[in-house]
Image (cartoon, grey):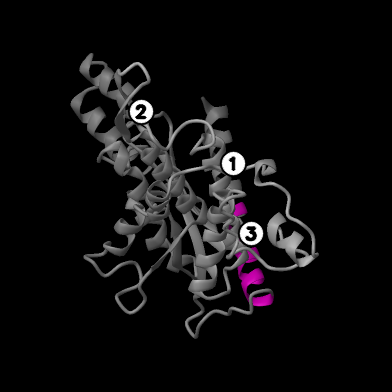
Amino acid sequence: MQYANYINKKTIEHTKYLLEQSRKAVFKYYTQVLDRHPDEDGLLDVDVSFDGTWHTRGHSSLFGAGAVIDANTGLILDYETAGKVCQLCNYNKARHDRKEMTDTEYARWKECHAPTCQVNYTGTSGGMEAAEAVACWNRSLSHEMRYINFIGDGDSSAYSAVISSNNGEGPYGKERIVEKMECINHVAKRLGNGLRNLRKETQTVKTKSGKSVKRSLLGGQKKLTDKVITRLQFYFRRSITRKVNTSEEEMRNDIMSSFEHCSSSDANPKHHLCPKSSESWCFYQKALALGKEPQSHSEMKVSFTLLPDQLQLVRKV
């Protein structure tokens, strides 16, 4: 037992040291590379993401952990754990119940054990991530940082908990509100989920034999297959990354160019949004720029064919 305690103590000390070094590295990166400096109070505004994990899957985990990660360096700035059970508490409670400890001994032990007890959370397992985020944000000032830009998914409960903490004042007061920034991967994931849910919608049709059956009008060969949806997600992420410093219209056109490109055919080529140059990724526009005849659309690696009204449903996603 004494060796386990020693290892645990050294692990905590080393973790603290690593976090301190990470914060120093982030300070250096922001000031020297990003030219972003601390304010007159010595506080540095940083862009972070936050993610939580659980000991077991589902909503019954007894332990969870969450980490604040600097968005520009990938270094961990802080972390928090949440525990709903303490094995030492269970052990000594059982001893007390068996009369192996007197009431006085048990009460004295609980008082001494309180500072190191692993139980620091009593809510639902699903709420652990939000509680962990609030704890990290409320500690950030002690590290001379403000986690001012929160990168997370669209329905992040952690972000909602952070901005509503401290009686609605947030971690830094109403004058310095934590801003939410969408993570490209989360947005792309929602796009994929939206397209797959759309594909699940069915309509009753009659077969050649006259039998009525329910079929997905958007699923099947040369339609919204998993391969097509995955590629559309990839093109979506690439467009946002490529056009991050451009106008909203330019980014939107770049996103839609992949959709129109992949749904084109020889009878209906739709490459008006694709780049028009000899270096274009679009085979059609590239051929035109070089004065050549474009190859057939049947040779495209990723393509799908839908009716006009079906294409409009996909555009809305």
Q: Write the residue at 59% across / 41% down.
A: 10
Among the two numbered marks 2 and 1 on one chain, the one whose residue lies closer to the N terminus: 1
Residue 121, x across and y down, in percent: 30, 42
Among the two numbered marks 3 and 1 on one chain, the one whose residue lies closer to the N terminus: 1
What is the residue that sits farthest to the left in this orientation? 103
Mark 2 and mark 1 residues within 8 Å of each other at the beta carbon: no
Circle 1: residue type: Lys
Residue 185, x across and y down, in percent: 51, 51
Point out the frontmost of discs 3 and 1. 3
Q: Give the range drawn in magenta.
A: 18-32
Identify which residue, 214 or 82, lies in the foreground: 214
Q: Would you say the magenta stretch is mainly helix, strand or loop?
A: helix
Circle 3: residue type: Gln
Q: Name the residue under label 1.
A: 10
- Residue 27 covered by magenta stretch: yes
Disc tally is: 3
Circle 2: residue type: Arg
In-image side of 20 versus 88 (left or right): right
